[in-house]
Image (cartoon, rainbow, N blue to C red):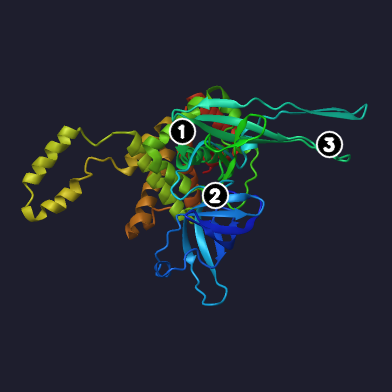
Amino acid sequence: MRIEEEYVKTGYFWLPERDEKKIPGVLTIKNGGNIELEVVGLFDDSIKSLNGDDNLNRIIGHVEKDGLVTLENCFYTNKNISFGGISKSKICVNKVLSGVAYDQNEVVTFNTLSFSVDCLDEWVGISGINVDSDWESRTATISYAPPENISYELDSGMKLEVCFAYTPPSSSSTTESKITQRVYFKLSSDDLRPLSDFAEIAYKLTNFLCFAIDTTVTLKGLSATSKEIQRDCGDGNKYPIPIKVFYPSIPFAEKTPDKNWHRMLFTYGMIKSNALDVFNNWLRAYEIMAPALSLYFSTKNGAQKYLDGKFLALAQGLETYHRRTSGEKLMDSSEFDSLVSTISKSCPEEHAEWLSGRLMHGNEINLGKRLKRIIEPFKDMLGNSKERSKLLRKIVDTRNYLTHYSESLKNNAADGEELWILYQKMEVIFQLHFLKVVGFSDEEIEGVVENCYPLKQKINKI
């Protein structure tokens, strides 16, 4: 996750079951969500603890400005023991819940999780700010009407809202008047759910935006609420206390992307009329082709550092995608079983195990045929028949060479600029299929290709 402001907080920390022993420390959360706690002393200086038997599953703290915090799934990365002097130890923290202190075995559940993502304002493209300038009379009027939140009932039982927060101009300023608007998502559930349920949906939606915006975007500004944790405001009403959430989420890009709407694959405006179906289709796709999605995004979020690795990930991803979405085999299953039975009867007993391994996947079609089936719906966008055949042959030969490094395939495999172009073509094939998966019609896909310059550029590369 993205940490936009430096987070270094000094405070006191203790174990939930030992609140009488508080030790000073510094809690640091770095950009990316990596969390570290440096403490002076140890939470437990017993012989058992000194031998390495520590239970730091949950740590409570009270830090400057933020107040109470709960640190989850902790362990020492550097334990220093000092006899009479000052010693500092470092603790890795998996998750921080800021604004609340949970008991030792208390279950953490929530009703809502709000979050934003890089470039979300540009992707949604809805603003309540209106500027009216009259140059002749030298006047300007700026007005703001907050847009209505947009709600969608997801198949998961949660509600997804596109929300709009804003800050009004300062009344004390005489030289500047500024209104800012921020778009964020809000997931809500009538029933209390563990944070992991919300985080899973947030992760999938972040990947959806990586796909739509066509760059790696990062989760940020997470805040959760629970109907069990409320504040009495003194007016007879109770309000849920917002709990800030920090953890090392993926995908993550060190640099905040700068992406205008016209360089995105598609915007919210293009799916607004059927956005509910699009969101649900995307979330449902993970149930069928999660491995293929993971392989595709590994090439976008930095998990694959080198072009060879990116290419192999996409080749495996396309093969997995077809395997998960098609049951096509070389021959009918009964026919194949009969053939296997016939061959097995003629096989010497000492080679039976070897033959069984060879025949285990004998009814699977090869990568070349899978690729041919995959590009079929979009073949007109990938050149003429000769060009498509050359493309598929090059993908197969390059995959086989980079997998086995057979000298006989070396001259047929792509490298350098040719490999980069091949990789981009494969990325295009994935993107076109993802558009189909979320519900774009053939005409709408053609419109995306026509209006998205980066996509058109990759398709037109020779």
Q: 291 or 146, which lies in front? A: 146
Q: Position of residue 371 (x, y in %)?
A: 37, 39
Residue on which the image places disc 1: 282
Q: Amino acid at mark 2?
A: Phe
Rendered image: mark on residue 252: 2
Q: 411 or 71, which lies in front? A: 71
Q: Position of residue 57 (x, y in %)?
A: 45, 55
Q: Position of residue 250 (x, y in %)?
A: 51, 48
The residue sitting at the front extreme is 20
Left or right: residue 60 compared with residue 262 = left
Q: 228 or 255, which lies in front? A: 228
The residue sitting at the top extreme is 273
Left or right: residue 209 compared with residue 259 = left
Is residue 422 visible in the rendered structure shown here? no
Vertical comparison of 215 with 137: above or below: below
* Local crowd size for mark 1, using a 10 Å CA cut-off: few (<14), some (14–19), many (≥20): some
Is residue 284 visible in the rendered structure shown here? yes
Label 3 SS = loop
Q: Quadrant of residue 242?
A: top right
Please report the residue visible at 22 percent of the width from the left and 40 percent of the height from the top. 363
Residue on which the image places disc 3: 171
Q: Amino acid at mark 3?
A: Ser
